[in-house]
Amino acid sequence: MSMATTSTSSPTTAMGVFWENVRIILHALALAMILRFTIAQPFRIPSGSMQPTLEVGDYIVVTKWSYGYGRYSFAPLEGLLPQGRVFGRAPERGDVVVFRPPPEPDRDFIKRVIGMPGDRIQVNEGVLYINGTAVERETLGPTPDCPGENSAVAQAIAYRETLPNGVSYVTCDKGVTELDNTRVFVVPEHNYFMMGDDRDNSDDSRRSVGYVPFDNLVGPAQFVVASFERNTSIFLPWTLFTGFRGDRFMKPVK
């Protein structure tokens, strides 16, 4: 007569399974960090300074290799790395770029490259001038894509600008402000002049951001991977569906 035996997992086997799971998790985390530092990194747009190109609640993907690798490519480890870039390639005028401004090197900003090294940049009566020549600008009129700041300005005026190299995009103008008339800025060597597309609602190189060194660039924005309305919250799960902007899904950033 045979007797059935009950098999139980030994403590050694259980620990082996545990450490195998830990190893897999650590490998996955290491791979994710390598991809984040060397290939691409997601960012969320928290403000309207780049409207209408980027809206609050957009999640964008920024490629790290496009301009080469500098200290800020590896944030938050930038304090351990030297100045300079490896495999560096200069941005093009009109690129939408994530960078670290010299006055606030611990924060990520996103703006459009307007001025290249050696350029003279000025805004006069709301018109952008590069090296003394007005940038081509077409009036599009009021649009919901350019919301006003308050009830007195329900909608801003949209303009289509076309830079000297042919890059074209839409800007918002909310009326006459201090940013509509600036001094002439001469962009230093190895630096860039950045401006937001929402021209009267942007802290950029016209204000406290100043000139942005090449070393402080993180990378260009490539596309919007997802976008949610401002009232969306993970604590209200249904809003992830009701607040999802399907028309912005995988939209290229230009």
Image: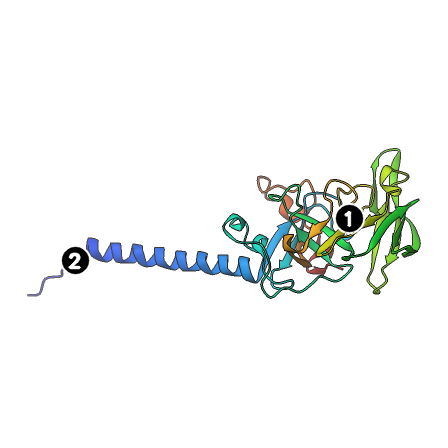
- How many numbered discs, if any? 2
* Residue 79 shows in the view: yes
Name the one closer to the observer, 199 or 26. 199
Question: Badge 2: few (under 14), some or many (20 or more) residues near its Cα, within 10 Å?
Answer: few
User: Eyeballing the image, is 131 above or below 236?
Assistant: below
Mark 1 and mark 2 lie on one chain; the one further toward the N terminus is 2
Q: Which mark is residue 25?
A: none
Q: Which residue is mark 2?
A: 6
The three-letter amino acid code for the residue at tag 2 is: Thr
Image location of residue 191, percent across then percent down: 72, 54
Q: Quadrant of residue 138?
A: bottom right
Q: Quadrant of the C terminus?
A: bottom right
- Calculate the distance from the C-alpha at mark 1 to the C-alpha at mark 2: 70 Å
At 83% from the left and 65% from the top, the residue drawn is 165
Which of pointers 1 and 2 indicates the residue nearer the eye? 1
Q: Secondary structure at mark 2?
A: loop
Image location of residue 56, percent across then percent down: 71, 45
Question: Badge 1: few (under 14), some or many (20 or more) residues near its Cα, within 10 Å?
Answer: many
Image location of residue 244, percent across then percent down: 68, 50
User: Eyeballing the image, is 149 above or below 128?
Assistant: above
Name the one closer to the observer, 29 or 217. 217
Q: Quadrant of residue 69?
A: bottom right
Name the one closer to the observer, 22 or 248. 22
Q: Secondary structure at mark 1?
A: loop
Residue 203 lies left or right of residue 62; in this view the side is right
Q: Which mark is residue 196?
A: 1
At 76% from the left and 51% from the top, the residue drawn is 193
At 26% from the left and 58% from the top, the residue drawn is 16
Dot 1 and dot 2 residues touching (CB under 8 Å): no
* Residue 9 shows in the view: no
At 57% from the left and 39% from the top, the residue drawn is 235
Q: How is the image coloured?
A: rainbow
